[in-house]
Image: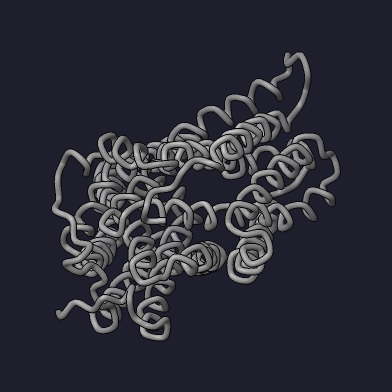
Amino acid sequence: MTETPLADAPPADSRLPLAFILITLVIDAMGIGLILPVMPDLIRQVNGGGLGQAAIWGGILATGFAVMQFLFGPVLGSLSDAYGRRPVLLISLGVMAADYLVMALTWSIWMLLAARILGGILAATHSTAMAFVADISRPEDKAPRFALTHAAYGVGFVLGPLMGGLLGTLGPRAPFYAAAALALLNMCLGYFVLPESVTDRIRRPFTWKRANPFGAILHVGNLPGLGRLLTVLAIYEFALFVYPAIWAYFTPVRFGWDTAMVGLSLGLFGIGYTIVQALLVRPFLRLLGEHGTILFGLVFEVAILTALGFVTSGTLALILTPISALGSVAVPALQGVMSRRAGDDAQGELQGVITSTISLATILAPLVMTQVFYLSTRSDAAIHLPGAAFLLAAALMVVCVVLYVAGAQEPASSSE
């Protein structure tokens, strides 16, 4: 396929490819959300045992997926820098479809684990899609377009569990067939509408030294200002994982919520997150600039996490849930700054490093946050404080503010 330097083309030329990328991210998130409601039933169907044993295997499957994302995110990012975003995206979608199909058909827990490991290795759609967005965007458009990708993910996470719950009434395997079909259809659409954004001007040869996560993090971290920004992102993601780690346990203990109320609150957060990313990030950037938007988001997170640490009213917590999404304006602004500080030939590598950074947080944070929740709610706890994990997250967010403010004046590379 003839290469087209989309990054140098008028914005209108990139609208169709951008629309495909957003659809890809919606479907990617839907595919994850589709299978969440039925995963416990599928695990029990293939392995037997009770819900507790299924939860243990669910944790193993989730950890295996996250570890593979950490290890292979930079590999796939570097492959896309060398061979193009188009083949990596299309192959990933095809293998993803096959992966879901294997999970739908298997009757072995070990095959299910192998499928999740393969899925983690080839979950390149997000980091490669973000690199594609960076390729086709002017510097001033990067942060708003990154916000659109987050909004697309938010839409997928709202729609996915809803569809998964409905399809689950047909059996625990039905959502996996649906996820496979969505991935396959999107691969077919991409074949016809997705151009290649990596040109000879920005192509970079593949090397294992920079493709492995440790080498990639070391290289990207040595670019001016990026080491500190990656540290801020890592601590930010670690702190905010307090929500998925303990929300389903915290709210019943603190407010007496049932499963329906927990689901409602998560849905409200997903809607709030989507609105913030789709409609509010650009006005924030216009009003405060990238640095001001990042600082606002970090400080807002400190305030909201502290409030959740002490709140005792379920009604107030439900009101705060969608409002808490406002702090997410910091992430696309932070990604915009980092993208401009990396060279045009390293956008895939950068997005792979970001994926590995987030994956590492998702591996470690649940262990810490659930342990803090347990220690603060056990019967012999010195102080019964179910919100202790949120207070820890707030303290970590203060560290993010200090690190960001201290490095705000660091010189950028010439690419910025």
Residue 403, x across and y down, in percent: 57, 34
Please determine whether, in this image, residue 8 is positioned above or below residue 246.
below
Q: Nearer the viewer, residue 215 or 45?
A: 215
Point out the image quarter for the N terminus.
Answer: bottom left
Q: Which residue is drawn at 84% across and 51% down?
A: 315
Please determine whether, in this image, residue 156 is positioned above or below residue 377.
below
Residue 122, x across and y down, in percent: 26, 54
Residue 150 located left or right of residue 387: left
Q: Nearer the viewer, residue 258 or 120?
A: 120
Please indicate, yes or no, whether residue 161 appears anywhere in the rendered image: no
Residue 358 located left or right of residue 206: right
Q: Residue at x 74, y 56 (%)?
A: 323
Residue 344 located left or right of residue 138: left
Point out the image quarter for the C terminus.
Answer: bottom left
Q: Quadrant of residue 394?
A: top right
Q: Which residue is drawn at 28% across and 78% down?
A: 194
How is this picture coloured? one colour
Residue 190, x across and y down, in percent: 28, 77
Residue 210, x across and y down, in percent: 22, 42
Please determine whether, in this image, residue 85 is positioned above or below residue 205.
below
